[in-house]
Amino acid sequence: MDNNYKPQIKSKSKTFRHWFTKKHKSKPHSSVYKQFSDDSGDESKEDVSFMSTEMDPCILTGELRIFVATWNVAGRSPVGSLAVDLDEWLNVKESADIYVLGFQEIVPLKAKTVIGGEDMTEATNWNLLIGQILNNKYPMTSERYNYLNNALGETSMTSVEYEEVNGCGRYTLMASKKMVGVFISVWINTSLFKKYSISSVKVSAMACGIMGYLGNKGSVSVSMSIERTSFCFVVAHLASGEKKGDEGRRNHQVSEIFKRTTFSRQLQDECMPQPLTILGHDQIFWFGDLNYRLYLENDLARELIKKQDWSALQEFDQLRQELGDGGVFQGWKEGNIEFAPTYKYSTFNSNRYSGTIPSRAGEKQRTPAWCDRILWYGKGVKQHSYFRSESKFSDHRPVSALFSTQIELIKSDDAKMVSSKQIEQERGKGEASSTLHSLIYKEQEASINIKQKQP
């Protein structure tokens, strides 16, 4: 996939549709064949038409609802009282098929956490709390989940119980990856395993912080295929700073993440080749604390926020200019922003932005900005909502988006479902998978060993 690709769709889609209508005078009877109209009213309708017509009408397709969200939690640990905020953030009443959650600063960005070994305690605590919320506060027990883990702090599912409780599908952890404070957690409704082939679940981390190679900044990514459609989810935490020229550092880090992120080959890839880079995927979601700021003085920005004039404020947004000028995210899309900037809120009074007069001594003066963003790239993607939540847990507000995506289905004789048997064969040496309980125990044991080795 070329990041410089500029789609030209209207003439081609009309020509193809004219040919297809002429060649196939009767409509297919199967409901999985999608019919697309030529209607183009407002801008959002044109976007939907563009995304839909990229899917070949001759191809069998399915549809998924994907919830993507990002939150910089400012180094704070999840606590039980956070469950209410998480419930509101994940909007569980409008359930999705897949939840992809990205976090930044799940640990304080201090020398000990950046340079030292990975401690998975906080990642495990977040996963436990997320699992309880997604499963309607039903306690997650270790017997329900099997995991494969290693010292690099990654977790991917090796088997799943196709159990449905009270007729409703349960959510299970599909993949998880931590690098210092950047963390991704992907959850999937287990009912999908009965409907679709899900394969090649991989994770990757790319550090581009201090000296260009430390993990205080960078990304963690998950690659997976559902039927014949490949997905990539990238959570990033980019360079901070609102001085002129800081946006160039962020642009450079984006380029480095594109360039240096790779996914390993697996044995089953020989039968169905899988993408090894971010841009090789069919549908890509890039989200996180991207740290792009406003080209605007603090007082003027706050005045526009007071008026809730989001359109005027977006004219000064650095990331919007990158998207419009064809910078590092050329060809990417972002939904319309109709909410207040998500950073930086006061740690003394989380109802107001930091530095608001009268400010307290020691409070940082920051121009409010939309640091927390969700972008996407690829065909067959439609965004239904883009919003922020109002949790006061951090100096950032969480941001979420709900998408529907079309996937290309494969023939039943080509399907290769992810199963514990296949994974055991690939692992080859009989390495036993662990339950969540043993995973937590190993993480705690590793943390103790690391602490004992430190002077």
Image (cartoon, helix red, strand yellow):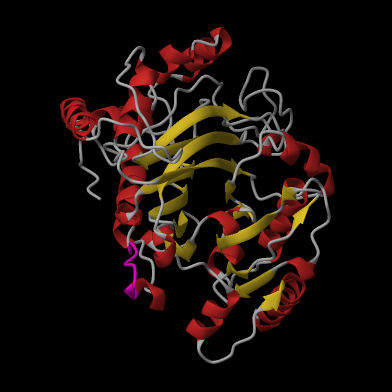
Q: Residue at x 51, y 25 (%)?
A: 367
* Residue 238 drawn at (x, y percent): 44, 47
Q: Which residues are magenta?
A: 270-276
Let me know if residue 259 is in the magenta part. no
In this rendering, the count of numbered labels is 0
In the picture shown, does residue 348 fall above or below 253?
Answer: above
Q: Is residue 357 visible?
A: yes
Q: Is residue 315 visible?
A: no
* Residue 184 drawn at (x, y percent): 56, 54
Q: Residue at x 57, y 34 (%)?
A: 399
Q: Nearer the viewer, residue 300 or 312?
A: 312
In what quadrant of the picture does the C terminus appear? bottom right
Q: Is residue 299 left or right of residue 190?
A: left
Q: Is residue 411 left or right of residue 455?
A: left
Q: Nearer the viewer, residue 158 or 165?
A: 165
Q: Residue at x 80, y 38 (%)?
A: 84
* Residue 151 drawn at (x, y percent): 58, 77
Q: Is residue 291 left or right of residue 420?
A: left
Q: Quadrant of residue 357?
A: top right
Q: Nearer the viewer, residue 247 or 122?
A: 122
Main SS class of the magenta portion in the image: loop
Q: Residue at x 59, y 45 (%)?
A: 97
Residue furthest to the front: 26
Let me know if residue 274 is in the magenta part. yes
* Residue 345 drawn at (x, y percent): 64, 30
Q: Is residue 272 left or right of residue 405?
A: left
Residue furthest to the bottom: 429
